[in-house]
Image (cartoon, grey):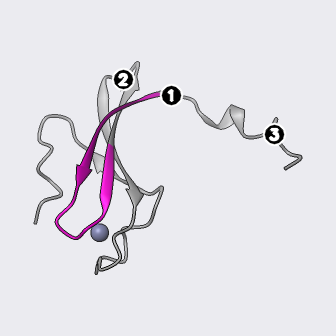
Amino acid sequence: MRHSSEIRARQPLHYTLDALHALPCGCVAAVYRTQPLDTELLSLEARGPHCIYSQHQPGRVLGLSNQDSDRLSR
Ligand SMILES: [Zn+2]
């Protein structure tokens, strides 16, 4: 791994891991709190072996969860 200096500039916001959620499909999503926006961001951390949602890819942002964190439960 030789290109180490280019990756750091790509984080304009500060992310703090707030919680982990197991989704009904078997995936695990993480809730990050972003500063200074004070917004919660849902990101998929691990894809479940039986997940049927093609949009559930590891590292993908699923959306913002400002106050209602139940948007993912379907
Ligand atoms: Zn899934």
In the image, is residue 18 part of the stretch drawn in magenta? yes
In the image, is residue 45 part of the stretch drawn in magenta? no
Q: Are marks 1 and 3 in contact (CB under 8 Å)?
A: no
> Which part of the image, by quadrant, shows the C terminus?
bottom left
Residue drawn at x 28%, y 81% as measured from the top left? 52
Query: Real-space Cα distance between discs 1 and 2?
Result: 8 Å
Which residue carries the number 3 mark? 4
- Dot 2 alpha-carbon crowd within 10 angstroms: few under 14, some 14 to 19, many 20 or more: few
Mark 3 vs 2, N-terminal side: 3
**3 vs 26: above or below:** above
Within the image, what quadrant is residue 6 found in?
Answer: top right
In the image, the segment drawn in magenta is 15-30
Name the secondary structure under disc 1.
loop
Q: Nearer the viewer, residue 25 or 60?
A: 25
Q: Are marks 1 and 2 in contact (CB under 8 Å)?
A: yes
Disc on res. 46 = none
In this image, 74 relative to 3: left or right? left
- Dot 1 alpha-carbon crowd within 10 angstroms: few under 14, some 14 to 19, many 20 or more: few
The image quadrant in which ligand 1 is located? bottom left
The residue sitting at the front extreme is 49
Amino acid residing under circle 1: Leu
Q: Main secondary structure of the magenta part?
A: strand
Query: Real-space Cα distance between discs 1 and 3?
Result: 19 Å
**15 vs 47: above or below:** above
Choose mark 3 or mark 2, whichever is in front.
3
Within the image, what quadrant is residue 73 found in?
Answer: bottom left
Within the image, what quadrant is residue 40 found in?
Answer: top left
Disc on res. 13 = 1
Query: Real-space Cα distance between discs 3 and 2?
Result: 27 Å
Name the secondary structure under disc 2.
loop
Which residue carries the number 2 mark? 37
Residue drawn at x 43%, y 66% as measured from the top left? 57
